[in-house]
Structure formats: structure tokens, C-alpha cells
Image: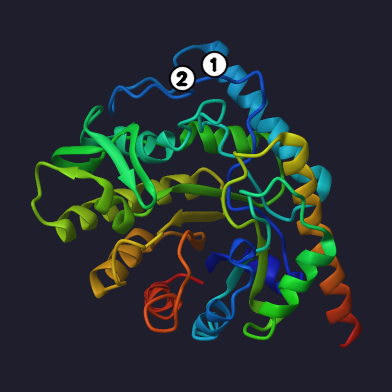
């Protein structure tokens, strides 16, 4: 993206997700903890990779400068596709269990998606987005961007914490885990990484900024923070958030 | 880079004011496509949104995005929205390059 900005005015891309191919149904990645197999079957693996290929084809057809995986692992054939955003990444870290109370977030109340439930120290123990990255780099020579999860500060507000008792400690361990995952994604050939910090749950504070910087520290890729869902204001919005990115190595 | 949805907020002046405070060494990603709207934004609408943000961020720091997810709309609509991103950016790019 940095090179693109230097070489071309107004480079184009999408945040990440794109409608799912109709032949791909249900969950792609098993949610059975850090020991989950990458795919439940070779059939699912093939269907998933075909779906990613079609999403990239559409992006390439229209001439986007940067393509994504289209987040084809989201269950967008069902009413609750956003569950993948909250579960896929966390389920493959240490410290979580795959059930809990219903989630409420923003204007979504009591939806039948369980709150990620932290029951022990959070740790990165395996590559998580690896099958997603592999599906993308196999399909395109164009610059690719991976939207890697909800950020640690936002996620910490949604987690049911039975271990830390301190949202800052919880979010910082999440940030360290995300940092290892972002480095793994980058090592597999993706040059642009992104995560979402909605930040509607907090006044952006120094600990939130520390989380963002920790997640990005030492990651050799172009770094993007995706914000959404709330109108920013001069007093509590982009100014503070941008300071967070400004103090990191983000460019 | 900080990326932020703008189309679904109508390129609100409050947002434009906030964007002006982003440090000059950071790029900005403008969201020009509302994934919650089944009506496809025209390239001219996208171009108008980009022009408005160019009052706050110089073009060398600006990339063009969707607002957020596109999973809630039909495939045929989504692909046309992607096309509007590319065409809307192209309209403004030609204008900018014509002034140099």
C-alpha cells in the first residue's frame, strides 16, 4: 500500500468481506480450540478455496489495486455470520472456551452468538490465518490485504473475562497474541495487514493506543486500522486514534 | 493508515473536521461504499465523496475503500459497487493529474 500510494494516486481496495459464493455453506474452520484441524475435510478446503478465487476474480475484474480474501470464511449464508469475526481467531488462541452467554454489542442485543469466554492466560500457539493467506497468495499476484480480526481493545470489551479481572491486562495479552499472528501472516507473503478497532466502547485512552502499538510492533507490513460504526468527533475520535498509530511504526 | 467509513455517514462535516487532525505522516482510507444500502453508488457519487475528503487530506495520503462489510448484499450489487469504487477514484485521479 505504501508503494501504491507512492506510485498511484487514490489506490483502491475494500475493507475485507465480500458476498459468499452460493456453493459454500456453514462454517469453514472448525471451532474446537487451538488443536482444531485447519479444515474439517478436503471437500470444505476445496469449496473454500474456490470461493476465495471467485471473490478475487471479481476484485481483479473491476480493477481494484489491492485484493482481499473476501472473508469467505464468514458464515454470510446465515443470519449470524458475524460470529466468525468474534470466534475464529480467539478460538485458536489459548485461554478461551467455545461457549458462553449471548453477545450484545452496540445496537445488537442478546444475539445468539456466544461471548468469547476467557478462562486462562491468553497465548498464541499456532498460525491462525494461515489457510486464508495461502488461499489468497495462490490466486493472485496483486497486492493483498488481510483483515485479521477485531482488535484487542475492542475485543476485550466483548469478552467474558473469568481470568484476568483487568481489562487492560486482558487486552494487552490479546495484543501480544495478535502481534505474533500478524508476523506469521506477513511471513507468508501478505504485504498489508489490517485489524478493526471500533473503539465505541471507550474514550480512546493511552492503554488502547498501547494495545494498537503492541499489536503492530515489529510487523514488517503496511498497517491499517479499520474504524467504523460511530461518528468520530474532534474531541474523542480520529485525533486520539491517529495518535495511537502515530506513535507506532505504522505508516 | 487509518480507514474510516464515510459514505454511510454522508461525509459528515464533523468527520471531515476530525480527519484533519490525523498526523501528516499517516495515510487515510476513505470508505465510499455503504454495504447496508442495496442501491449502487454511482461513480460520480463516489468521486464527490473523495473530493470532499480531499479538503482535509492531501491526495498522496488517500486510498479508497468500502465503508465496511459487503456480506449483507447480493453478489451482483456488490460487484457493481466495487466497480464504482474504481471508476469514482479514476474520475478524481484524472482531475488531479490534469492539474499537475
Confirm or deny contact between disc 2 and disc 1 (CB under 8 A).
yes
Residue at 69%, 31% in the rendered image: A53
- Give the residue furthest to the right: B98
Residue A92 appears in view: no
What element does badge 2 sit on? loop
Asked if A162 appears above or below A172 in the picture, the reply is above
Quadrant housing residue A239: bottom left
Which residue is rendered at x = 8% and y = 52% of the image? A165
Q: Is residue B32 above or below residue A41?
A: below
- Residue A141 in which image quadrant: top right
Q: Is residue B72 above or below residue B17?
A: above
Compare marks 2 and 1 and give the one earlier in the sequence.
2
Q: Position of residue A220 (x, y in %)?
A: 47, 60
What SS does tag 1 mark? Answer: helix
**Residue in view at x 30 percent, y 39 percent:** A103
In the rendering, at what x and y percent does residue A152 appear? 31, 54
Q: Which residue is mark 2?
A: A39
Q: Is residue A135 above or below residue B79?
A: above
Q: Quadrant of the N terminus of chain A?
A: bottom right
Amino acid at each position: 500500500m505504501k508503494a501504491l500510494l507512492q506510485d498511484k494516486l487514490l489506490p483502491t481496495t475494500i475493507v475485507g468481506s465480500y458476498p459468499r459464493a452460493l456453493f459454500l455453506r456453514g462454517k469453514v474452520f472448525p471451532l474446537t480450540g487451538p488443536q482444531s484441524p485447519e479444515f474439517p475435510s478436503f471437500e470444505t478446503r476445496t469449496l473454500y478455496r474456490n470461493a476465495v478465487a471467485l471473490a478475487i476474480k471479481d476484485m481483479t475484474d473491476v480493477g481494484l489495486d489491492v485484493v482481499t480474501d473476501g472473508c469467505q470464511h464468514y458464515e454470510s449464508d446465515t443470519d449470524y455470520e458475524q460470529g466468525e469475526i468474534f470466534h475464529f481467531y480467539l478460538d485458536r488462541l489459548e485461554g478461551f472456551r467455545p461457549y458462553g452467554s449471548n453477545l450484545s454489542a452496540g445496537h445488537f442485543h442478546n444475539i445468539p452468538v456466544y461471548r468469547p469466554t476467557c478462562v486462562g492466560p491468553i497465548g498464541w500457539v499456532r498460525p491462525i490465518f494461515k489457510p486464508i493467506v495461502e488461499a489468497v497468495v495462490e490466486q493472485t499476484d496483486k497486492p493483498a490485504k488481510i483483515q485479521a480480526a477485531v482488535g484487542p481493545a475492542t475485543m476485550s470489551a466483548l469478552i467474558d473475562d473469568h481470568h484476568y479481572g483487568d481489562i487492560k491486562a486482558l487486552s494487552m495479552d490479546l495484543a501480544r497474541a495478535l502481534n505474533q499472528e500478524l508476523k506469521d501472516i506477513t511471513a507468508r507473503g501478505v504485504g498489508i495487514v489490517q485489524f478493526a478497532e471500533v473503539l465505541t466502547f471507550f474514550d480512546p485512552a493511552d492503554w488502547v493506543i498501547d494495545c494498537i502499538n503492541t499489536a503492530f510492533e515489529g510487523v514488517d507490513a503496511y498497517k491499517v486500522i479499520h474504524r467504523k460504526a460511530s461518528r468520530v468527533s474532534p474531541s474523542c475520535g480520529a485525533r486520539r486514534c491517529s495518535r495511537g498509530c502515530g506513535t507506532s511504526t505504522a505508516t | 493508515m487509518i480507514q474510516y467509513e464515510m459514505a454511510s455517514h454522508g461525509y459528515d462535516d464533523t468527520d471531515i473536521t476530525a480527519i484533519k487532525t490525523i498526523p501528516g505522516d499517516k495515510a487515510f482510507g476513505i470508505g465510499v461504499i455503504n454495504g447496508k444500502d442495496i442501491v449502487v453508488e454511482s461513480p460520480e457519487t463516489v468521486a464527490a465523496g473523495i473530493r470532499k475528503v480531499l479538503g482535509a487530506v492531501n491526495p498522496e495520503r488517500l486510498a479508497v475503500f468500502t465503508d465496511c462489510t459487503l456480506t449483507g448484499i447480493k453478489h451482483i450489487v456488490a460487484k457493481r459497487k466495487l466497480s464504482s469504487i474504481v471508476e469514482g477514484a479514476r474520475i478524481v485521479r484524472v482531475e488531479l493529474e490534469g492539474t499537475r
